[in-house]
Amino acid sequence: MALLTVEGITKRFGGLVANHNISFAVEQGEIVGLIGPNGAGKSTLFDVITGYYRPDAGEVRFDRHGLVGRRPDQVNRLGIGRTFQKLRPFHAMTVLENVMVAAMRHQADPSAARREALSYLEFVELLDKRDSYARDLSTGQRKRLELARAMATRPRLLLLDEVTGGVDQRTIPTLVQLIGRLREQGLTLVVIEHNMRVIMSISDRIVALHLGEVIADGPPSEVVKERRLIEAYLGDAFVVPSGERLPSGESSRGNA
Amino acid sequence: MATVDEPRAESPARRRQAGGREPRRGQASSHCPMATGGVAAPAGRRRLAGVLLLLLCLAALAFPWVFRLPYHRDLVIRVFLYAMLAQAWNILAGYCGQISLGHAVFFGTGAYASTMLQMRWGWNPWVGLVAGIPVAVALSLAIGSPCFRLRGHYFAIATIAIGEIVQTLAINWDFIGGARGLTLPFQKDSLLAFQFHTSKYPYYYIVLALLILCLLVSWRIEGTRLGYYFRAIREDPEAAQSVGIPITRYKLIAMAISAAFVSAGGSFYAQYVLYLDPDSVLPLSLSILICLLAVVGGVGTLWGPLVGAALLIPLSEFTRIQFGGTGRAVDLLIYGALLTLVAVFQPAGLVGLLRRWQRR
């Protein structure tokens, strides 16, 4: 049985349909890349899964639990951690305190939570910044802080929204490495990512959204050939009839 | 679950073996490159706070022997009472970030509850003080449950509205004296009767005990999960939810603790002044004063409310003496000016200012 199942999720904002009848499943231990142009409904879908939005139709199942109607904190307690596209650290708290708060879900005692938090900070290589205030960190550091904070709630499934967005090129390999190490720990991941090279290399499977609908679902090597995906990203002028060659050279076909 | 947790659960233990208890003991030591900021400072500050609290207790205990004029004692009693109210407000607004401008409701609840129980049913005022607390807590939960759906300014506005409604109800409710108010029956001096006419000492110590209790509770909250959760909710409610914090429940906890202390303060006030009416215990101006003291002193700090009360309450007395009836609003002018200065230059209040100097 799949760890996470999204079944026919529809979410409207007034007349705008942000998610339309979206269905896919995530298996235990899998890394699923969620891609799509801006406005495709990726972050909305994350908000629906984690309880920030209530969908107009559909159900989300996580390990036999229905998630629709649960509050975000309840969803987290079931074992789903997340990061935010627009980063949301606790600004006036130190890096260590940010992670401690999350670890306190299991460890009410501050010194025990502190020890646990330090191990996550070591994992994301922010140990030397532990006493800085979160507001003083760079974007890349904040991304890693959010990752550590999400991990400190000991999730089984992590939803990562734009891991490399707004991060300078040199930091990207560090973040990609981190994701690899998360997988080694047995975590299941759903990752929203715009950087095609990154997402193609880390994902076992890609789910592509466009205008709120799933337009492709499969291994990276197959998804990149999908006509509708290329149309969505680049317009139909770039679609090569045979689907043999990728425009723009963003990704090579053999890397998955 | 277990398979996922094991590798990570192991690593803190390993570090503890390798590095001993270094992270805890060495908070202010050299291995920490930023020893002056962040966690090191709050931890050290916490110890300092404990020492200060002790010193304050000693100084306060000695105070009545230093100042012998009843007027001075009355002034200090008021300072302590308002400091306690502001600190109670600070638990909800400072730590947890929910700005209430309706705290007079809980003050009035405490004052009316203990007085009514005493006057109608002959309850002892101490029992009345204690009995008023659950009433205020229940009321705070009833107010909080719908209002905590509102964020930021909207919550503050809702609490103003509720404060006004409650005051209007009290004015028109004859059972509790309506607009005429209630005059408490005069009784002989005794601790049991909670009335002291020959000397203000006992009032002084009672309100001091309340203030110290409130400070101790706040100090304790700061160092436990409750305090961390409150701050996380203040910083970012959505992110707090994402790490499993049921934010409404914790806001209600903050509200209940806050209301409990304010209610006790209201009961004390009724026994101290022996007269209450909706205008003296339920006005919006009281709610705003409570907030103002904490803001000027330092929101979200342990000492801010006390510093604010110690500065502003005597200031208002002083202006009243200096200008008499003609200068009735002078203290408000000064409050306003101070508030503007704090808002513009030092949002962390006077305590924040002191810390900045300390760091230099």
Image (cartoon, helix red, strand yellow):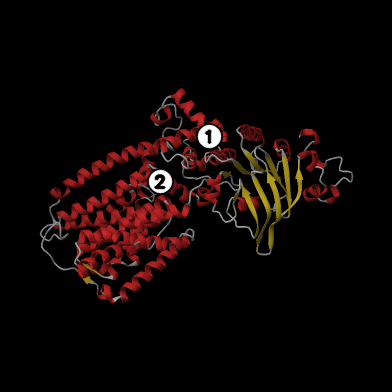
Label number found at residue A71: none
**Element carrying mark 2:** helix
Residue B351 at x, y percent in the picture: 35, 46
Tell me the kind of residue under disc 1.
Tyr
Judging from the image, mark 1 belongs to the subunit labelled A
Closest to the observer, B295 or B44 = B44
Q: Quadrant of residue A27?
A: top right
**Residue A90 in the image: above or below residue A126:** below
Tell me what residue is drawn at x 13 percent, y 48 percent. B65
Which of the 4 image quadrants contains residue B106?
bottom left
For the residues labelled 1 and 2, say whether their Cβ atoms are less than 8 Å apart. no
Q: List the residue tagged with mark 2.
A: B227
Instruction: Kindly identify the residue that appears in the image at 35 percent across and 55 percent down.
Output: B258
Using the image, determine if residue B109 lies above or below residue A125: below
* Residue B82, x across and y down, in percent: 28, 56
Look at the image and tell me in which quarter the N terminus of chain B lies.
top right
Looking at the image, residue B135 sits to the left or right of residue A5; the answer is: left
Q: Distance between the residues labelled 1 and 2?
A: 21 Å
Q: Is residue B23 above or below residue B72?
A: above
Q: Can residue B330 be seen in this view?
A: no
Task: Give the numbered dot on residue A120.
Answer: 1
Pointer 1 and pointer 2 on the same chain: no
- Is B164 situated left or right of B276 in this image? right
Residue type marked 2: Gly
Between A252 and A237, the residue placed more toward the observer is: A252
Q: Which chain carries label 2?
A: B
Which residue is pictured at 73% across the width and 43% down the height? A206
